[in-house]
Amino acid sequence: MAISFNGGTSGGRRRGRGSTAISDINVTPFVDVMLVLLIIFMITAHVMEFGIEVEVPKVRQVQDTAQDLPVINITRDGNIYLNDRQANINSLPADIQQKFPRAKSVYLRADRQTPWDVAVQVMSELGAARFGVNVVTQPEDTAGKKR
């Protein structure tokens, strides 16, 4: 009893008409799997960054207002104000220590048209008095801009 698998011909391969053996590797399933893994990695990488839950300790609420903090304002024409009162640049560190004895840093608000020289001199005086200087800025509104 004989069994024939290739259509009755005795040769191992069909010659002439018909299909030939494909010797190329099909990479389509490999690419599909790699794209799925890439998507899974992109999703889980973000979750892993924020995945740790920590319950922070609760503290008593401290209420600071702008009037309680040392804020130095510099106007367009170079006038210097400590909160609401005009101040002299030479006595500025002493005035801050007198009005705010526990202050370690100050907020510096300068108009964008302020001469750079005045702002740098104020920062230099405050740095010499060992005050930390926090410059107050306003974030740019990107929603209203057109390209």
Image (cartoon, grey):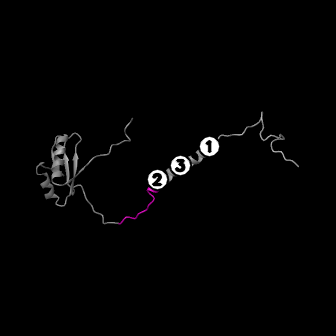
User: In the visual, does 8 lie left or right of 20?
Assistant: right
Q: Nearer the viewer, residue 82 or 117?
A: 117
Name the spot of residue 10 as percent of width and height, x first. 83, 41
Q: Which residues are magenta?
A: 47-57
Percent across and percent down for residue 140 are 33, 43
- The disc, 1 or 3, on the residue closer to the chain's N-terminal end is 1
Disc 3 + disc 2, Cβ < 8 Å: no
68 relative to 31 in the view: left or right = left
Disc 2 marks which residue?
Answer: 46
Amino acid on which disc 1 is placed: Thr
Identify residue for label 3: 39
Q: Work out which residue is located at the far front of the displayed protein and give it.
A: 11
State the separation of the CA atoms marked 1 and 3. Answer: 17 Å
Q: Is residue 84 visible?
A: no
Q: Residue at x 51, y 51 (%)?
A: 41
SS type, badge 2 = helix
Residue displayed at 22% across by 47% down? 109
From what the image shows, is residue 110 above or below residue 50? Answer: above
- Percent across and percent down for residue 97 are 15, 57
Q: Nearer the viewer, residue 5 or 96?
A: 5
Dot 3 falls on a residue whose secondary structure is helix
Q: Are the residues at dot 1 and dot 2 in contact (C-beta closer than 8 Å)? A: no
- Report the mark closest to the observer, 1 or 2: 1
Label 1: which secondary element: helix
- Of residue 123 and residue 6, the one placed in the foreground of this image is 6
The label on residue 28 is: 1
Q: Within 10 Å of the Cα at label 2, are there few (<14), some (14-19), or many (20+) other Cα atoms?
A: few
Q: Main secondary structure of the magenta part?
A: loop
Q: Earlier in the sequence, mark 3 or mark 2?
A: 3
Q: Is residue 138 left or right of residue 83?
A: right
Residue under the image location 26 percent in, 48 percent down: 136
Q: Quadrant of the C terminus?
A: top left
